[in-house]
């Protein structure tokens, strides 16, 4: 029954009353009936569809693909996505209608406009990708927020060290940490361990320069009972076995003798070893990080370090800059060390501005280790809350006339210079203390005096 028929038909009336797109064709694809809204779906008048071939309409670009050939081929209900000429996306379901001989004689299809749903799906996919990107960026930021608690890295040089350390932490490649004594090679090694997949495993540090050459093999690999004179009766497990599942950190690896270098090379290559005096081959799973303050390439030229071992260790070299090349890190390091040692010894201390200037100008041959030792010494030996130049050891002091030269050069009245000094002290005390009462106790003055002076220098 078609829309052109004038006599009333119950089934036709039902079909036309439906608010969904419904289309009925014969097996040749000729449209026999449609619901009232079908034409609006495809952007044409509904009555213009009756009698048309869906194949011709597809050629005209009205919609594609077609339900008829798919249903005839599958001989069953089929659902697919159809695209219309005006860009809509329709979820079309084609249903075969069988006659008395169980042969298909009609195909009924109905559709739902899913354009917005598909656009929403596309948007959600994009958003998911964006969220993944943001999530990764947040993770990177989280990883970089370690600086406040673990490593000071305000300088570009140290930021590069940290970024490289974060990258290598994700893989099991050998790492060689290079740098002068005291720059923090063991701290970086620990940092890599904490950020690696082996963070739940042990971190075994071996100072190669502190173990006598004759005992190195026994310490590294362990030994069986009775292996040598003085050996423990029950034998001893080696440092390599203790590093199972974790990281073996060989500090000062440049101090190893050629003989011990050979043994280390064999361990790295094979991850197998024998205990001293043992006959059972042992396997171990560990990651290797080595460190040295020596120039291994020069040692290779001098035949004091094996080139093949160097290549095994030097998979990812990380050069840690000396403190004198990362001046931006000195003040944050001083502040961090002051807090640490003030808490450790229960002595609140701040550094006078002149002392800070002097510390910034030093060469720091001992690097962070030297600064650490000096700050501990100053906190322990200073007699007042403010560490002044008088508290500095002689090797760290400026010439006695430096301050007077600075005064003459600036040509400032005494009151102004004293005011600047007082303001500087108040500012540092405010950063150090949480409350004004704490500031008052720290500076040895009353709380109202603290309030008045903060107001005076606009530091409220």
Image: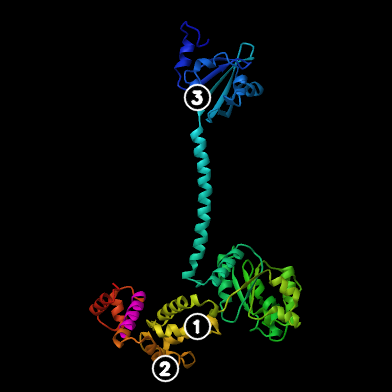
Coordinates of residue 343 in the picture (x, y in percent): 40, 79
For residue 425, which quarter of the picture?
A: bottom left
Judging from the image, what secondary structure is the residue with disc 2 in?
loop
Check disc 1: other Cα within 10 Å, few if <14, some if 14-19, many if 20+. many
Q: Given this view, does label 3 or label 2 mark the residue nearer the observer?
A: 2
Q: Nearer the viewer, residue 388 or 358?
A: 358
Q: Which residue is mark 1?
A: 371
Residue at image position (26%, 77%) is 456
Identify the mark nearer the N-term, 3 or 1: 3
Residue at image position (33%, 73%) is 434
- Tell me if 172 is positioned left or right of 348 in this view: right
Name the chief secondary structure element in magenta.
helix
Q: Which residue is mark 3?
A: 41
Q: Nearer the viewer, residue 266 or 157?
A: 157
Q: Which residue is mark 2?
A: 401
Furthest residue to the top? Answer: 7
Residue at image position (51%, 65%) is 144
């Amino acid at each position: 029954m078609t829309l052109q028929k004038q006599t009333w038909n119950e089934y036709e009336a039902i079909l036309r009353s439906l608010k969904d797109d419904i289309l009925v064709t014969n097996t040749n694809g000729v449209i026999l009936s449609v619901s009232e809204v079908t034409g609006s779906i495809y952007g044409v008048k509904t009555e213009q569809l009756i009698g048309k071939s869906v194949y011709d309409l597809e050629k005209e670009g009205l919609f594609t693909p077609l339900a008829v050939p798919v249903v005839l081929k599958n001989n069953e209900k089929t659902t697919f996505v159809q695209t219309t000429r005006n860009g809509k996306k329709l979820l079309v379901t084609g249903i075969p209608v069988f006659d008395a001989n169980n042969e298909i004689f009609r195909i009924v299809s109905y559709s739902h406009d899913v354009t917005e749903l598909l656009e929403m799906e596309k948007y959600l996919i994009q958003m998911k990708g964006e969220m993944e990107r943001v999530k990764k960026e947040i993770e990177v930021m989280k990883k970089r927020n370690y600086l406040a608690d673990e490593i000071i890295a305000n300088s570009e040089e140290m930021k590069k060290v940290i970024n490289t350390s974060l990258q290598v932490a994700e893989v099991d490649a050998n790492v060689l940490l290079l740098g002068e004594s005291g720059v923090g090679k063991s701290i970086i090694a620990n940092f890599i361990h904490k950020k690696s997949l082996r963070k739940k495993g042990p971190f075994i540090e071996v100072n190669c320069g502190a173990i006598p050459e004759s005992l190195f093999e026994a310490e590294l690999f362990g030994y069986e009972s009775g292996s040598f004179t003085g050996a423990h009766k029950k034998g001893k497990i080696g440092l390599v076995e203790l590093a199972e599942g974790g990281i073996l950190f060989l500090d000062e690896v440049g101090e190893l003798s050629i003989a011990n270098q050979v043994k280390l090379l064999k361990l790295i290559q094979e991850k197998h070893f024998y205990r001293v005096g043992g006959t059972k081959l042992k396997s171990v799973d560990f990651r290797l990080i080595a460190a040295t303050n020596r120039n291994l390439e020069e040692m290779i030229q001098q035949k004091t370090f094996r080139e093949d071992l160097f290549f095994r260790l030097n998979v990812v070299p990380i050069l840690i800059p000396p403190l004198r090349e990362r001046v931006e890190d000195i003040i944050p390091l001083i502040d961090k060390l002051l807090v640490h040692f003030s808490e450790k010894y229960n002595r609140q201390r701040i550094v006078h501005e002149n002392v800070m200037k002097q510390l910034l100008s030093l060469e720091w041959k001992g690097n962070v280790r030297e600064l650490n030792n000096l700050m501990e010494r100053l906190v322990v030996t200073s007699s007042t809350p403010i560490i002044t130049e008088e508290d500095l050891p002689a090797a760290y002091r400026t010439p006695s006339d430096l301050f007077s030269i600075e005064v003459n050069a600036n040509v400032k009245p005494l009151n102004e210079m004293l005011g600047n000094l007082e303001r500087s002290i108040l500012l540092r005390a405010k950063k150090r203390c949480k409350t004004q009462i704490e500031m008052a106790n720290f500076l040895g003055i009353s709380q109202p005096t603290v309030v008045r002076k903060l107001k005076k220098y606009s530091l409220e």
